[in-house]
Amino acid sequence: MRAGSHTFRSSPWATAALAACALLMIVAGGRRAPLASAEDVQAEDAQAAKQNAQQELAGSFDTAISPFLVKYCTECHSGDLPEADLSLDKYETIEQVVEDRDRWDIIQDMIATRTMPPEEEGQARPSEEEYTFVGHWLEAKLSQVDCTGPVWPGRVTLRRLNRAEYNNTIRDLLGVDVKPADDFPSDDVGYGFDNIGDVLSMSPILFEKYMAAAGDVLDEVFSDEALRNRVLTTRPEGDRGDAEAAKTVLARFASRAFRRPVEEHELERLLAIAELARKEEASYEQQVQLAMQATLTSPYFLFRVEQDPEDPQAVRELNDYELATRLSYFLWSSMPDETLFELASQGKLQEPAVREQQVRRMLADPKSESLTRNFAAQWLQLRDVDSAAPDPQKYPEFDDALRSAMKRETELFFESIVREDPSILDFIDSDYTFVNERLARHYGIEGIEGDQFRKVSLSGRRGGVLTQGSILLLTSNPTRTSPVKRGKWIMSNILGTPPLPPPEGVEELSEDEGAELLGSLRERMEQHRANPVCASCHNRMDPLGFGFENFDAIGSWRTEDGRFEIDASGELPGGQSFDGPAELRSILRETKAEQFCRCFAEKLLTYALGRGLESYDRCSVDRIIETAGKDDFRFSSLVLAVVESEPFLKRGGTGGKP
Amino acid sequence: MSGHLLISRRTVLRGLGTSMALPLLDAMRPAPALAAQAAVGAAGSGTPRRMAFLFVPNGANMDKWVPNRVGYDYDLPYILEPAARIKDDLLVMSGLTHDKGRANGDGAGDHARCASVFLTGAQPRKTAGANIRSGVSVDQVAARKIGRATPFPSLELGIEGGRNAGNCDSGYSCAYSSNVSWAGPSTPVGKEINPRLVFERLFSNQKSKDGAESRFERDAYQRSILDFVREDAQRLQSRLGQSDRLKLDEYLTGVREIERRLSRDDTGRAGRDADNFPKPAGVPEEYAEHVRLMCDMMVLAFQADLTRVATCMFGNAGSNRPYRNIGVSDGHHDLSHHGNDQAKLDKIAEINRFHVSQFAYFVERLRSIPEAGGTLLDNCMIVYGSGISDGNRHNNENLPIMMAGRGGGTITPGRHVSFPYETPLCNLFVSLLDRMGAAVPWHGDSTGRLTGLEA
């Protein structure tokens, strides 16, 4: 489903696709964020206006909204060259608005946060009551998504194994941890993850690598007696000839490699390959090895194949083997194990209770570490820690030991959330973290000795991922902090409302040597924000970043920056003010809980499915949040809700949403 | 300087209606002499021609790039100074444009666009993942047409792996910013960043495996595997939807490529050794050494005629690498948004200049190798440049582009040529394809052929 406008992709997750422009450059997020807008409103007026809005929901667009638009918006947003390529004069009915829901989500957000119309001279501003009324009217209208009918589960493009999945699958299939894919070209990233079917292409060089890797890995296996015996479960003996023995071995091997029972005709063709080698007087081992190399080069191994429903408009429930495969690549980035195969063969994975049991078992398994390495590392952009390059002149204490300790801290923190299963709100703020001696020294925590990491209690300065060295580092420039990057990071990865890029031709913040004469970084940024075009966006981004100014570009605590005292106070849109990172964290944890959980659920669902989310996934995300909310947003409750979601369990036809 | 813009394909389309067969006019055909010469080279009886495209990220400080004077007597501004020793082999071209790198209604994301458009000349579809679409890149066009002459149709190299976290640029999938080579509109060709692996691929002495001592036997085994997987892929393809079929098409192309290599008779072929070049140990820590090793790999591959087409990305689009070895500790991308700040502009010029020195190293290496009474460089066309010009404005006209080599005597370097404003960079590509014996009527948004490459 695509909206008519050429600049806008009909997905709430694709707000960035909008042309950069004054109105839309703000963080908008493109989805309703009930808490975000509710909190922005002064309590009493708000309550009254909200009731009015609800009462008048039945009221027409003409009486409720049109006058507001004409009075405050259409002077700029209409005509041949509307601002932000947004013509508000073309909407005449509520149906048109709902049809263009994703765009109106942004508009609603702009109004609810008082971002538009801009604070400019000569620009009429709505009263608080008008703002509240229209904001709520739109929110109510736009949130009326009909989730009662069947949910379209979408369709995942045929996915090849990415590098991590290939390595893990080879490890679990053959028992060798040789990581051949480390030498493959890197996988491209879409929607923030490198396991997206649409983006994982199969270039000729990659095929060449897969084919060579199959040969190399099997050489490794067959040159080691123990490993060889593990795969060669049967040998020719007495009446049992090479072909018969090979058939037994290959039937088991190919079924595991293809993640479903191998079909008779496939097996016959594999045996024909073994037979070819036998005719060349190759040994039994060599015959089997050759057939195995073919298996590991087959598209049924390299791609995760799911059957489309026959009717392109129809939806089918995934079969047990497909479910086992989805579960194992979601939680382990690898192939299903014996237990999952066994359950699949019994048809048990169709039962929700069995699935829950399996999810819990899989999360407890050490292989769920792949969630840290692949999901968390990409969600939190942790992989960027490796390439962060603080200036050695300014930060002489930074070295690779500190770099890896920072990364490890966040990994352990994520792992503890998987294992201990607290509320995922601990990501925003927590009273514990993990340090070794090097990192403890960096944080000013005393009494920690040795390279071993351990859990420590925190009070005040740090808590949650936002104050971990890794995140503070990767959101900084090499020579200084960047409150903008920090704010943008929080908006993108915690609040799920990534800001749009700045419009073209915007003056950049001056940073040269002389600039300091004009004031502290913060003062200069505030001057920069005096420009209303910039302010509409930076008013949301910058305060979030300023709140963490007590941490320098490598995450050390500081109270001064050069000759300037650090001012880590600020005010969020909507009026909550804070002074310092502790207060900001606690505001975020208290007031942005649902928004964060939505963001997290979207990321997790994207990763689990291997596709970008579309507007029809909204009901599924709503349901995930609702379900997880009943269990205090524990990590496992989100994982379980993702697994039980329609898009995870089902597959739509190629015809798209009917 | 007139007549560079020949008759545009669109003009023809407009005039004749799309039902007419194209192209019709001489101006749209390759010069017959060029085609004939190239055909000789491609057939193997003459000296082969090679082409390479080197991409640098984030544009350039154009004030210190564009020479003041045109013609033979051109000057080398600060950034081009390291090219002094190759000045006579260099053709600096100003005025070339990539219109499809512009937003054209798609909004922000110039960095992602600038890499994907660099060799394709096609407007990339704005998507974070679903249905990525660009165009076929010029190197891949050549690889498709003349790649059969060599063991490897083309080489795709780079210094930075694909970015593996976060979003790349304003709603564009990272595929756009980390690839300049596109085998098909939705198939970016992953690049090799490890010189050791490039070396092994080029010069592997085909491990002989137990039981497969003879080459014949080994090849027969490989073929049996390829037969098996082709059947799997075809069977699977018949059951899949459109976007899935595309994936299988890509897969089958890979199958065919290996089959082709198996069917080549390369035994006794001259020049198939690495000329005593030591095998690289892996990815060097030092950026300059890494770049040079990659250049060495291209030199070796060209010298041994293992391939005639190569691309190398000195960095991914939007790369934020600091260059401490030349005293620049800020990230390159951060700097490129210079806001006309002189200190930043100076640092960008330093980075640009440093990249040019790497380019000069490559060109000098090619020139040091004798070939057919001249040097290897004489038979090369090495294009160097970026897909945006000023990193701050992100504009796509007057791109920083230069080329080294003589294209087998079809190019007259040692000059600065200034083309009319808005001349498509793709016109250069079409002209180079002519010289490779891989002529196409148009490429990307080309409007004709570029004249003036020969003096």
Image (cartoon, rainbow, N blue to C red):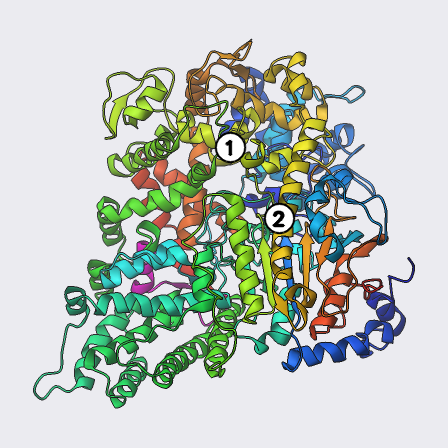
Q: Residue A216 colored magenta?
A: no
Residue B112 in percent (x, y) is at: 62, 48
Which residue is under mark 2?
A: B112
Q: Residue A310 colored magenta?
A: yes
Q: Is residue A238 left or right of residue B429?
A: left
Instruction: Please report the residue visible at 75 percent of the width from the left and 31 percent of the height from the top.
Output: A73
Which residue is under mark 1?
A: A489
Q: Nearer the viewer, residue A272 or B196?
A: B196
Q: Is residue B34 above or below residue A555?
A: below
Alpha carbons under labels 1 and 2: distance apart: 20 Å
Q: Nearer the viewer, residue A207 or A306?
A: A207
Residue A103, label in figure: none
Which residue extends farthest left? A238
- Chain identifier of the residue bearing label 1 in the image: A
Q: Nearer the viewer, residue A99 or A439?
A: A439
Instruction: Bin the neighbour count of mark 2 within 10 Å (Cα to Cα): few under 14, some 14-19, many 20 and up.
Output: many
Instruction: Bin the neighbour count of mark 1 within 10 Å (Cα to Cα): few under 14, some 14-19, many 20 and up.
Output: many
- Residue A226 location, quadrant: bottom left
- Magenta residues span A306-328
Residue B120 appears in the rendering? yes
Q: Nearer the viewer, residue A33 or A507?
A: A507
Q: Badges 1 and 2: C-beta atoms under 8 Å apart?
A: no
- In what element is the residue under mark 2? helix
